[in-house]
Image (cartoon, helix red, strand yellow):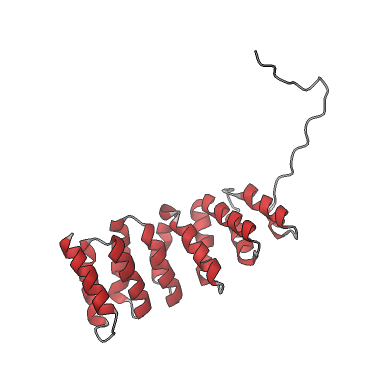
Amino acid sequence: MPLVRRDPPGAPAAPSRPEASPADLRAPEPERRLSAAQALAGRPGAAAALGAALGAETAPRVREALLCALIACGEEGAASLAAHLRAEEPALRNACVEALQDMPSCVLPLLPGLLADPDPDVRLLATEVARTQPPEIATALLARLLEREAHPNVCGAAVEVLAESGTPDAAPALRIARARFSALPFLPGAIDTVLARLAAS
């Protein structure tokens, strides 16, 4: 029978680690910030502090931990991640897109607003976030975008996603977009390719 080691009576308890505080996310030591991010993952109410820390973090390991912690925070984390789609740093924007793609149900309530954002760069990134939605949902969201979108790069990004996962329900919106951008050299041909695929599916 295996022996189970027991502490002798009266032995002092092992010291417990102090509970992480959002203030630890601003500590000068990267390891302390890393530990705080890991400890705050999924904690109710922590998403705002985690999101603020993400915007200022430069250490790759800590940034990755912050992204994972925000994913664990569900819809609150998705909102904090989505705020960084406006960040000036491309690497941060792309990291947040990938994180949001990993939580499709949590980001879904935000997608209509992101796809209608006044900033075309945010709308373009939102089409990438929509890529991991179920095909019917992605099609409905991107078709609504195509019906009104005036920026060719945003339309091109939406068409690219629909080429991969669109359903035939996207066809009317694709035709509207094709007519709007008929004078451009690249969009009409790309849309025709998607329409042909959808017609054959």
Q: Residue at x 29, y 85 (%)?
A: 184
Q: Residue at x 52, y 63 (%)?
A: 95
Residue 194 or 119: which is nearer the viewer? 194
Count the numbered circles shown.
0
Residue 160 or 145: which is nearer the viewer? 160
Task: Tell me which corner region of the image, top left, top right, bottom left or bottom right, holds residue 178.
Answer: bottom left
Q: Is residue 71 above or below residue 81?
A: above
Q: Residue furthest top?
A: 1
Q: Residue at x 58, y 57 (%)?
A: 64
- The reply, left or right, for residue 87 in relation to residue 127 is right
Q: Is residue 6 above or below residue 143?
A: above
Residue 113 in sight: no
Q: Position of residue 105 (x, y in %)?
A: 41, 53
Residue 109 in sight: yes
Q: Position of residue 146 (x, y in %)?
A: 30, 73
Q: Is residue 114 above or below residue 50?
A: below
Q: Position of residue 65 (x, y in %)?
A: 60, 54
The N terminus appears in which quarter of the rendering?
A: top right
- The reply, left or right, for residue 57 in relation to residue 28 is left
Q: Residue furthest bottom?
A: 183
Q: Is residue 95 above or below residue 124?
A: above
Q: Position of residue 102 (x, y in %)?
A: 45, 54
Q: Residue at x 20, y 65 (%)?
A: 197
Task: Tell me which corner region of the image, top left, top right, bottom left or bottom right, holds residue 157.
Answer: bottom left
The C terminus appears in which quarter of the rendering?
A: bottom left
